Image (tube, rainbow, N blue to C red):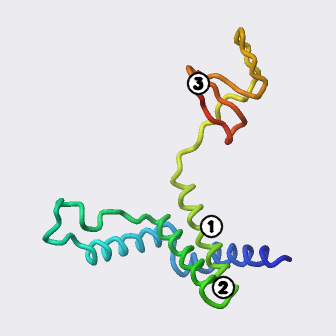
Amino acid sequence: MTTASKILTTAAEIVGGARSQTHGPKERSFQHIANLWNAYLKSAHSEPKDCPIPGMCGWEAQISAVDVAWMMTLLKVVRSVQGTPVEDHYVDAAGYAGIAGEIQLSQAKPETKPPSPRQCSHTGCNLVTPHWHEGDKVYFGHWGLSSGVER
């Protein structure tokens, strides 16, 4: 087993195993962390009395559960490049990135697949790359790698 495989396997075992039982559902746990971080940031960075534009000087952003997972990943990145390389940093970073993906993908709307690329049958169309038409746009490429261009 390669080192990368070992790191990813260990992360998968931790994320899907005992940690879930210890800390509860990942999304709920990370949302609670986000709520506490938001409260802290709002309090620590409250709007000063001399703010020239009311409502524009304090903390207004909202951290989400996905943000928490990515920020924890970044914490592990910094630890791995600033200190002595420790396998735990890489395992944790992989685990946090996986949790970010799990939460984000669970919240994502299902994608609708566009029509399969096909050769154009329009008179005068000399495009030879796979493409399709939808209204005034011509789409080139394959599912997931396509882009629309106005005709």
Q: CA distance from mark 3 to mark 1?
A: 36 Å
Residue furthest to the bottom in view is 84
The kind of residue on which mark 3 rests is: Lys
SS of the residue under disc 2: helix
- Seen at 62% across and 67% down, the residue is 98
The kind of residue on which mark 2 rests is: Asp
Report x, y in % for residue 94.
65, 72
Q: Which residue is mark 3?
A: 137
Q: Quadrant of the C terminus?
A: top right
The answer to whether the residues at label 3 and label 1 have Cβ atoms under 8 Å apart is no
* 77 left or right of 34 in image: right
**Vertical order, 61 against 15 (above or below):** above
Q: Which residue is mark 2?
A: 88
Q: If you read the primary sequence from the N terminus, does the residue marked by circle 3 or circle 2 appear first? A: 2
Which residue is at the front of the view, 38 or 51? 51
- Seen at 73% across and 18% down, the residue is 120
* 41 left or right of 10 in image: left
**Vertical order, 81 against 31 (above or below):** below
The kind of residue on which mark 1 rests is: Gly
Q: CA distance from mark 3 to mark 2?
A: 49 Å
Q: If you read the primary sequence from the N terminus, does the residue marked by circle 2 or circle 1 appear first? A: 2
SS of the residue under disc 1: helix
Q: Quadrant of residue 40?
A: bottom left
**Vertical order, 63 against 109 (above or below):** below
Q: Which residue is mark 1?
A: 98
